Image (cartoon, rainbow, N blue to C red):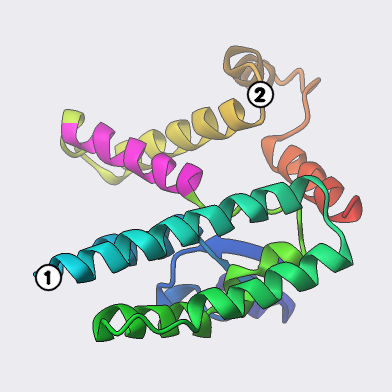
Amino acid sequence: MRAFHQHGSPPFPVLICDDAPQFKKLTEHLGLCWIHEGRHYKKLKPLLLLHRQYIELVLGQLWDYYHELLAYKQAPSPVESERLSAKFDTLFSQKTGYSTLDDRLALTLSKKKALLLVLQFPQIPLHNNPAELGAREQTRRRDISLQNKNDKGTQAKDTMMTVTATARKLEVNLFDYIYDKLSKTFKLPSLASMIQQKSQYHFDSS
């Protein structure tokens, strides 16, 4: 949020996340994670067999539609975008007669703009599982090592884990990168500049 206040505009154009309120106004375009959206349906535990069958049917339709969005990312077109937009309306405005499920469908329908941001930016992912896995790695480290003795230890651990994870995602050799910085050779660009370059490439080529 600090970057937003300093520059008067969001620090990055697109953010893919769950529907937590703290992400609102943090970015110009907020996309929602389809994996999170699907979990809402899996959490429904009706007593009646008929209602469970309705949920299975809707989940099947949801994931079939998800795979159509994946196909769109490979070959986007205005015609296909319009078709997928109309199909979204049809799918999530349906009435099953199971009120809890129908309410859930209506909530998904209300998130259309965020869930279909991929129609505008085909290069973005449909879920944010990689980010969640990164956070989970931090949790596993904490479970193994408990807590650090002081703030400097915490900062050192967080910095090293961040550099390691970022280098892995950018396919940068971690040893070479750390040696480059510690030896002050500076033959390799910073991770921050590599992130910016990749991000700029994705959006300029869309």
The rendered magenta stretch, by its main secondary structure, is classed as helix
Q: Say if 111 sits above or below 41 in the image.
A: below
The answer, for residue 53, to whether it is visible in the render is yes
Answer whether residue 134 is magenta in the image. Answer: yes
Residue toward you, 17 or 100 = 100
* Residue 84: quadrant of the picture: bottom right
Answer whether residue 183 is magenta in the image. Answer: no
Residue at the location (76% across, 61% down)? 121
Q: Position of residue 154 (x, y in %)?
A: 32, 41
Mark 2 Cα-neighbour bin, 10 Å: few <14, some 14–19, many ≥20: few
Q: Position of residue 22 (x, y in %)?
A: 43, 75
**Quadrant into which the C terminus falls:** bottom right
User: Which element carries disc 1, helix, strand or loop?
Assistant: loop
Residue at the location (30% across, 68% down)? 54
Give the label, 2 or 1, closer to the camera: 1
Q: Is residue 200 left or right of residue 13?
A: right
The answer, for residue 27, to whether it is visible in the render is no
Residues in magenta, as a range: 129-143
Spatial CA span between label 2 and label 1: 50 Å
Residue 171 tag number? 2
Q: Is residue 91 left or right of residue 48?
A: right
Residue toward you, 1 or 97 = 97
Q: Which residue type carries mark 1?
A: Leu
Q: Which residue is mark 1?
A: 48
* Residue 30: quadrant of the picture: bottom right
Q: Which residue type carries mark 2?
A: Glu
